[in-house]
Image: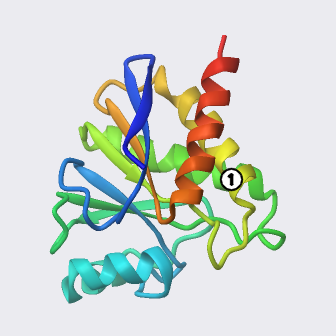
């Protein structure tokens, strides 16, 4: 699936199937982190493997974080200058999960804004081992980021980088629907 998107409030929103660790045209990518910010499975494991061992050392001083929180490190071995680490909610455990998931996206994009970054790539936060239903998570993500768009001046591109074609197609459909419902 190629990148497909929309511009809303001067911000380009994109969805693509791809590897979150190989987005060289983005200033920052988001890690679906665990509370200790250490290597794990899924996105966190891939980002730590690609960034190298210096990332774990940098993360040690920032941990632990709570669901919805975000912290930033340099990108180390990634082609991106920075990595934003967000801890999403475990679905059905960390409540209210929709608010905590929205906090991940809000805090992540606001951290990029605070650091003057212009482009950010998000994975589908909390949808892997944390069990958040993919479509519900996509709706929370797009609603949150579209609401934040009006307050952003540095961030001009928000990309969703999805692991599978199926997930990318679902996100694209949800994005299409959210744009068509926007006032």
Q: Where is residue 93 in the image (x, y as percent from the top left)?
A: 81, 73
The relative height of residue 169 versus residue 151 in the rendered view (above or below) is: below
The relative height of residue 18 versus residue 16 in the rendered view (above or below) is: below
The relative height of residue 163 versus residue 183 in the rendered view (above or below) is: below
Tally of numbered tags: 1
Q: Which residue is drawn at 53% across and 52% down?
A: 168
Residue 172 in the figure: left or right of residue 113: right
Task: Give the quadrant of residue 13.
Answer: top left
The relative height of residue 102 versus residue 49 in the rendered view (above or below) is: above
Q: Residue at x 45, y 50 (%)?
A: 108
- Label 1: which residue? 137
Residue 102 in the figure: left or right of residue 73: right
Q: Can the viewer see residue 126?
A: yes
Q: Position of residue 139 (x, y in %)?
A: 69, 42
Residue 106 in the figure: left or right of residue 17: right
Q: Can the viewer see residue 61?
A: no
156 or 166: nearer the eye? 166
From this viewpoint, which residue is outermost toward the top?
Answer: 183
Q: Residue at x 24, y 59 (%)?
A: 82
Residue 14 in the figure: left or right of residue 127: left
Query: Crowding near pointer 1: few (<14 within 10 Å), some, many (20+)?
Result: many
Q: Where is residue 183 in the image (x, y as percent from the top left)?
A: 66, 10
80 or 102: nearer the eye? 80
Q: Position of residue 161 (x, y in %)?
A: 42, 55
Element at label 1: helix
């Amino acid at each position: 699936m190629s990148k497909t998107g929309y511009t809303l409030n001067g911000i380009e929103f994109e969805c693509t199937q791809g590897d979150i660790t190989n987005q060289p045209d983005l200033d920052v990518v988001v890690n679906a982190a665990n509370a200790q910010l250490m290597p794990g499975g899924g996105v966190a494991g891939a980002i730590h493997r690609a960034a190298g061992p210096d990332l774990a050392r940098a993360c040690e001083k920032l941990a632990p974080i709570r669901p919805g929180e975000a912290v930033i490190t340099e990108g180390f071995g990634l082609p991106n200058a920075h990595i934003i680490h967000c801890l999403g909610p475990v679905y059905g455990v960390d409540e209210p999960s929709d608010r905590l998931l929205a906090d991940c996206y809000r805090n992540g994009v606001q951290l990029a804004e605070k650091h003057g970054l212009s482009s950010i790539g998000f994975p589908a936060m909390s949808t892997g081992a944390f069990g958040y239903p993919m479509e519900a998570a996509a709706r929370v993500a797009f609603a949150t980021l579209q609401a934040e768009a009006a307050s952003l001046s540095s961030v001009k591109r928000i990309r969703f980088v999805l692991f599978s074609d199926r997930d990318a197609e679902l996100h694209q459909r949800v994005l299409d629907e959210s744009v068509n419902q926007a006032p």
